[in-house]
């Protein structure tokens, strides 16, 4: 904060007052008034007394003017001081939410050596909003700003008297004093619950989630900046594991975050250089033993020849906002490759849950198909139950657009979501895929076997094709055929291979030969 210095008008007033007081003192000391009276009496023929009266009146008027001037100057000085305070406030606060900003937080961290910091213990909560980007993209920044203001108000109400900071975007930090032995995870869950309450902005109901990281000062470090970084690590760990979670910092999170940062940087470069390519795994008709299509699966082979598993880089792509670019790049490549296949072969392609929350997804996909000239009826998009549940309204709009354009829709990972039968009745699915977790164990598990039977029977009753994925054993294949499953997929029937190794006729022949 800036120090106050005397203004120029204040200096001038002080100088004139000093001169006035000096003259009064000299007049009293040397009896100037007696000499002046004698001088006037001696020259009484001149109107000197009138002159002095006029001078006294002028002096009195000047005094009044000076008082008024001093009052105006005082107002001006106060106005400038207030303006200076406003400038300082603006510099240290977020203009949208009026919460302290990152600069304010840095100034607080700089005070860590002050005794009061040494005497007090703090819980540091790092908060990142889940689903906020979707609000900006779909409803506009005005709605996003309104949501941020509402979140700021909720956090301030939840932590009265504590420091709540907005660091930018949808990131918040809370410094909460610790007294006694509070259940800080429960406090973190209260943050999640408060933010999870629906917002109503301009008549529109908006749902948000929150990922919360927790670190302790001075338990997790004697440097407050370091403790805040630790709470960030915990928050990123919570974000990776799902939505509406609270994680407490542990040292191993540092290594996880460092790895994630490296993977994200490498992933950005890989997408830019188109290093991630589709591999194709056959889909086999279990009644005719023929290949009816291929599923495109993302594969990333680094320059050193190492394969990065999709389970590692797909979540990073989703968290870093790269999934849209990656998916569109892969879809263009896959459609281009599929143009060379026989016309009766289908291309199956997975849609990320984050993509399904974009109302423009249908238009994006149809534009890619149009650019490449790939027929809509030859592509099959796989969506999961969890993706539909996250934003059912948007999912319906997107899927209806695609179905109306002739695109096929498959419900992936069936039975692992929350409301499978509800999804079947509300959406138009061409195919249901039995999750590999059922196929792996249904032979040895009577309950799993009954589930698989029920799904196949349900498909037959609804007129929906059933695909079993994860077939790796001959016995699994025979059992699924006996149950009347329509399509099979798995390492037993064919591994994912790059387009260079793919030959539909050869794949079909090898499967028939294998079955014999």
Image: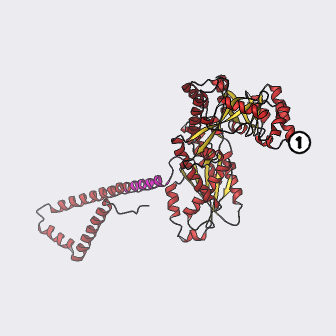
Relative placement, left or right, of 7 versus 183 is left
Above or below, 355 against 363 in this view is below
Which residue is rendered at x = 62% and y = 56% of the image?
Answer: 256
Above or below, 6 against 157 in this view is below
Q: Look at the image and say whether residue 403 sits in the magenta stretch.
A: no
Colour mode? secondary structure
Above or below, 374 against 92 in this view is above
Q: Does the magenta stretch mainly form a helix, a strand or a loop?
A: helix
The image position of residue 70, as x and y in percent, is: 34, 58
Badge 1, how many Cα within 10 Å: few under 14, some, many 20+? few
Which image quadrant: the C terminus? top right
Query: Which residues, given as a range, are shown in magenta?
Result: 77-97
How many dots with numbers?
1
Q: Nearer the viewer, residue 167 or 300?
A: 300
Relative placement, left or right, of 477 versus 319 is right
Image quadrant assignment for residue 29:
bottom left
Image quadrant assignment for residue 144:
top right
Q: Look at the image and say whether residue 96 sits in the magenta stretch.
A: yes
Q: Which residue is mark 1?
A: 446
Q: Nearer the viewer, residue 501 or 199?
A: 501
Q: SS for tag 1?
A: helix
The image position of residue 111, as x and y in percent, is: 51, 66
The image position of residue 7, as x and y in percent, is: 33, 60
């Amino acid at each position: 904060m800036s120090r106050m210095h005397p203004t120029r008008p204040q200096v001038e007033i002080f100088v004139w007052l000093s001169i006035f007081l000096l003259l009064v003192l000299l007049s009293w000391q040397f009896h100037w008034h007696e000499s002046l009276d004698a001088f006037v009496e001696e020259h009484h023929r001149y109107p000197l007394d009138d002159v002095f009266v006029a001078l006294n009146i002028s002096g009195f008027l000047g005094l009044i003017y000076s008082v008024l001037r001093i009052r105006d100057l005082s107002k001006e000085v106060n106005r400038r001081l207030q303006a200076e305070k406003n400038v300082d406030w603006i510099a240290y606060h977020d203009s949208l939410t009026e919460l302290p900003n990152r600069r304010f937080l840095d100034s607080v961290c700089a005070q860590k050596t002050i005794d009061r910091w040494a005497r007090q213990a703090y819980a540091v909560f790092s908060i990142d909003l889940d689903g906020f980007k979707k609000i900006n993209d779909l409803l506009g920044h005005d709605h996003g700003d309104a949501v941020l203001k509402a979140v700021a108000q909720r956090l301030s109400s939840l932590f009265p008297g504590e420091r709540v900071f907005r660091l930018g975007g949808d990131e918040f930090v809370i410094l909460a004093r610790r007294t006694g032995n509070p259940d800080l995870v429960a406090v973190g869950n209260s943050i999640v619950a408060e933010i999870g309450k629906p917002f109503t902005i301009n008549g529109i109901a908006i749902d948000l989630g929150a990922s919360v990281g927790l670190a302790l000062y001075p338990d997790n470090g004697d440097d407050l900046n370091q403790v805040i970084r630790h709470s960030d690590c915990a928050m990123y760990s919570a974000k990776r594991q799902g939505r509406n979670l609270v994680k407490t910092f542990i040292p191993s999170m540092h290594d996880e975050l460092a790895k994630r940062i490296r993977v994200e940087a490498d992933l950005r470069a890989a997408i830019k250089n188109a290093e991630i390519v589709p591999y194709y795994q056959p889909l086999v008709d279990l009644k005719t033993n023929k290949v009816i299509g291929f599923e495109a699966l993302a594969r990333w082979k680094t320059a050193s020849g190492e394969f990065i598993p999709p389970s590692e880089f797909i979540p990073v792509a989703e968290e870093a906002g790269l999934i849209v670019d990656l998916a569109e790049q892969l879809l263009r490549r896959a459609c281009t490759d599929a143009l060379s296949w026989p016309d009766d072969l289908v291309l199956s392609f997975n849609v990320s849950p984050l993509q399904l929350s974009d109302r423009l997804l249908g238009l994006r996909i149809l534009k890619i198909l149009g650019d490449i000239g790939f027929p809509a009826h030859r592509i099959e998009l796989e969506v999961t139950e969890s993706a539909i549940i996250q934003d059912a309204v948007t999912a319906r709009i997107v899927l209806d657009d695609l179905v109306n354009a002739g695109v096929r829709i498959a419900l992936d990972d069936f039975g692992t979501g929350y409301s499978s039968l509800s999804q079947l009745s509300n959406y138009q699915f061409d195919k249901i895929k039995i999750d590999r977790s059922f196929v792996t164990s249904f032979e040895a598990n009577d309950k799993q076997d009954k589930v698989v039977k029920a799904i196949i029977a349900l498909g037959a009753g609804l007129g929906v094709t059933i695909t079993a994925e994860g077939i790796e054993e001959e016995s699994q294949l025979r059992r699924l055929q006996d149950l009347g499953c329509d399509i099979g997929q798995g390492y037993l029937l064919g591994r994912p291979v790059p387009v260079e190794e793919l030959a539909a006729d050869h794949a079909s022949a090898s499967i028939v030969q294998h079955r014999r």
